[in-house]
């Protein structure tokens, strides 16, 4: 009998899960609370570990039509503009890890996955459906929505993001924690910028208690910029899309170098939201219990300082596909999935937290970081255990 699976959430993680489950031969009901598919946000980076999985799904051609493939990652001092380190990407990444490094707009990533999912007749996409509760027993899982829909399946996958309803009922844990970091995000057409501010590489500018990252998206035609500073904002944290005052970011960068201030000054529209996460996972029980599993940010929301939030969701989905392809009971499928994923996810969560601390250090520690970066830049910036993939 075909496996019947309900997926809560239609973002990047939920669509990746739907594609993965369909590839494993399952019948999928995907529930998305919004009335239309769409991603609010800016760019994401896809390491070779993630690009390799997308290629395995047959999405290489679609990816190349919308992504950029930067040739290098540069780290610079936000104060002086001096280069601290460089990691070649491009051919080096392809040769070492079997896939290139890509950068892409979130909307393009979601649309790429949505187009692939729509080609799978065994996936039913249901918009405007908000999961309210579920019940599971030895026979299956029953999923109910606020709109009155009731579905019965063999498994439920919660891919409903940072404020996951599925997670809350499954684990009954606390709300996500506030990191104390604020992210200002912007997208701008490169041809609207002065020539000196355009870029086709990833650049991270590191300063005391702040950093800024920029990289090309949309085949290099657009530039994604995110500035992160330490601070807090009021209001409801689950409504992350706060209207931002560009002047606040410019004020925070007042002591930085001219090229960085010029870039920020050339961009008028910014979105601001406080970054939240959860502590690193402590065991497989935090990713699956019985017939219910969590995927992506619902399971392991992380700070963006390894650029692997979307990547870990896609890796989760690939692992779920592999486990679903086995002829074993569903509870065993999900238990094996969680056992294979939780430690890697926890490691990326912990490393992301640590990177944020390193990016924002002050005083003598900052001098030590810069010295180490100048001496060992490529070695410090490369992450072989991550980029080789989960099964290396």
Image (spheres, rainbow, N blue to C red):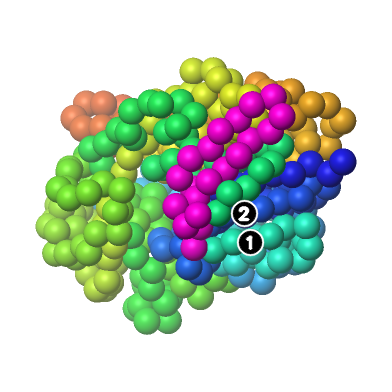
* Measured Cα–Cα span from mark 1 to mark 2: 5 Å
Q: Residue at x 79, y 63 (%)?
A: 121
User: Which mark is on residue 382?
Assistant: none
- SS of the residue at dot 2? strand
Q: Is residue 326 visible?
A: yes
Q: In the image, residue 153 lies at what x, y percent?
A: 69, 41
Q: Residue at x 67, y 37 (%)?
A: 155
In this view, 50 is above or below 325? below
Q: Residue at x 43, y 37 (%)?
A: 302
Q: Which residue is mark 1?
A: 125
- SS of the residue at dot 1? strand
Q: Nearer the viewer, residue 2 or 167?
A: 2
Q: Quadrant of the N terminus?
A: top right
- Total residue callouts: 2
Q: Residue furthest top?
A: 283
User: Which mark is on residue 30?
Assistant: 2
Q: Quadrant of the C terminus?
A: top right
Q: In the image, residue 150 lies at what x, y percent?
A: 58, 49
Q: Nearer the viewer, residue 355 or 340?
A: 340
User: Which residues lie in the magenta part?
Assistant: 128-148
């Amino acid at each position: 009998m075909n496996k019947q699976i309900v997926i809560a959430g239609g973002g990047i993680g939920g669509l990746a899960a739907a594609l993965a489950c369909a590839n494993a031969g399952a019948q999928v009901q995907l529930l998305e609370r919004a009335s239309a598919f769409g991603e609010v946000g800016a760019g994401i980076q896809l390491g070779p570990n993630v690009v390799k999985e997308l290629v395995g799904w047959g999405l290489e051609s679609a990816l190349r039509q919308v992504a950029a493939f930067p040739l290098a990652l540069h780290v610079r001092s936000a104060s002086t503009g001096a280069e601290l380190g460089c990691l070649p990407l491009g051919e080096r990444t392809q040769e070492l890890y079997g896939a290139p490094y890509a950068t892409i707009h979130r909307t393009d990533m979601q649309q790429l996955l949505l187009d692939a999912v729509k080609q799978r007749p065994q996936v039913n996409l249901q918009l405007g459906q908000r999961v309210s509760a579920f019940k599971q027993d030895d026979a299956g899982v029953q999923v109910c929505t606020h709109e009155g829909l009731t579905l019965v399946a063999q498994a439920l996958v919660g891919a409903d993001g940072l404020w996951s309803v599925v997670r809350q009922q499954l684990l009954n844990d606390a709300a996500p924690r506030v990191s104390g970091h604020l992210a200002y995000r912007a997208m701008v057409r490169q041809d609207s910028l002065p020539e000196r501010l355009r870029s086709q590489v990833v650049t991270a500018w590191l300063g005391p208690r702040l950093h800024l990252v920029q990289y090309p998206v949309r085949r290099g035609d657009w530039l994604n910029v995110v500035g992160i500073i330490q601070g807090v904002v009021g209001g409801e944290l689950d409504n992350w899309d706060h209207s931002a005052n560009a002047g606040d970011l410019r004020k925070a960068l007042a002591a930085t170098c001219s090229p960085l201030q010029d870039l920020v000054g050339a961009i008028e529209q910014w979105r601001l939201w406080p970054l939240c996460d959860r502590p690193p996972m402590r065991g497989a029980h935090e990713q699956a219990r019985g017939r219910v599993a969590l995927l992506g940010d619902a399971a392991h929301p992380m700070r963006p300082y390894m650029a692997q939030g979307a990547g870990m969701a896609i890796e989760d989905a690939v692992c779920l596909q592999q486990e679903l392809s086995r002829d074993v009971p569903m509870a065993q499928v999900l238990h094996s999935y969680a056992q294979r994923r939780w430690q890697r996810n926890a490691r990326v969560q912990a490393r992301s937290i640590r990177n944020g601390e390193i990016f924002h250090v002050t005083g003598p520690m900052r001098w030590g970081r810069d010295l180490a970066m100048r001496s060992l830049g490529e070695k410090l910036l490369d992450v072989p255990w991550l980029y080789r993939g989960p099964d290396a």
